[in-house]
Image (cartoon, rainbow, N blue to C red):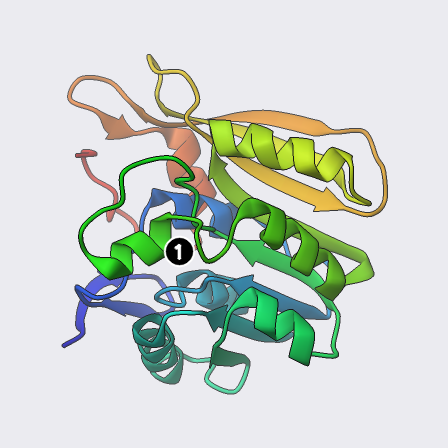
Amino acid sequence: MAEIIFRFREFDLQQNAEVFPLGTDTMLLGAWVQPLEARSILDVGTGTGALALMMAQKTTVNIAAIDVSEKAAELARLNVKQSKWPSQIAVSQISLQEFAKTNHNHFDLIISNPPYFRNSLKPQKLHRATARHDDRLPLCDLLHFSLLLLSAKGRICLVLPTTEAVHFIGLAEVSPLHLLKKALVKPTTSHPPNRMLLEFSKDPQAVAEEMIVIREGNPAHYTGQYIEMTKAFHFPGALGPAE
């Protein structure tokens, strides 16, 4: 049974125990990505539908949201139906691999918070295993099939742990993709980066780099940088001391 656990400025997000929950990775990616002049958007591994909804808040273009999990697609459809944008977002239960084979459209923006634990012990619950391990969507497949779906001037934006991000950058270097933007994400001021936000396109340009710090102080509070970055989605005062 779904229950409201997070209230954004312009939509409510429901979750349940069968779908991997909204986390900071999704918040960061959704806040960081700018749709710009994209005429179509694809959200790969939509989960609760949060990224698709964040994009809908930023733009009026059509958004396709896909997830291989039946439970995730069901929950994403519920969240979309209850939002302001039920006709803007189309949710499908399908893998990226199958979607690329059957879909004949190209997308100007592809976004993803993909599964990423390639060599770690799998959690016991299947939904968490599917959401966080790459058996069903290895990074090489994410790159290959996203390229098939990307328009000539399109962009691919994703969030990954640093090790997997370096791996994906290496894969992209021997593909038609070029790294455009990279944001190193530090969980606190005293910790090294543990995430990267990445943006790629087929058009080579100088790489823009930045650093994002999520928490600071003792006890830890969200940084002014993070609050400013996510203010379009959070209510004022919603971000108190970070746990």
How dense is the environment of label 1, judged by Cα within 10 Å: few (below 14), some, or many (20 and up)? Answer: some
Examine the rendered structure and indicate whether residue 126 appears above or below residue 134. Answer: below
Residue 83 in which image quadrant: bottom left
Please indicate, yes or no, whether residue 117 appears anywhere in the rendered image.
yes
In the image, residue 73 above or below residue 96: below
Q: Position of residue 193 (x, y in %)?
A: 44, 22
Secondary structure under badge 1? loop
How many numbered marks, from 0 up?
Answer: 1
Looking at the rendered structure, the kind of residue marked 1 is Phe
Which residue is nearer to you in this view: 83 or 77?
A: 77
* Quarter containing the N terminus: bottom left
The residue at 40%/78% (across/down) is: 80
In this view of the protein, which residue sits in the foreground, 97 or 50? 97
Image quadrant containing the C terminus: top left
In the image, what residue occupies the spot 27% across and 54% down? 128
Q: Which residue is mark 1?
A: 233
Q: Residue at x 70, y 29 (%)?
A: 208
Q: Relative to the observer, which residue lies in front, 150 or 221?
A: 150
Which residue is rendered at x = 44% and y = 49% of the image? 134
Q: Would residue 86 appear left or right of 165 to someone viewing this image?
A: left
Q: Position of residue 202 (x, y in %)?
A: 82, 47
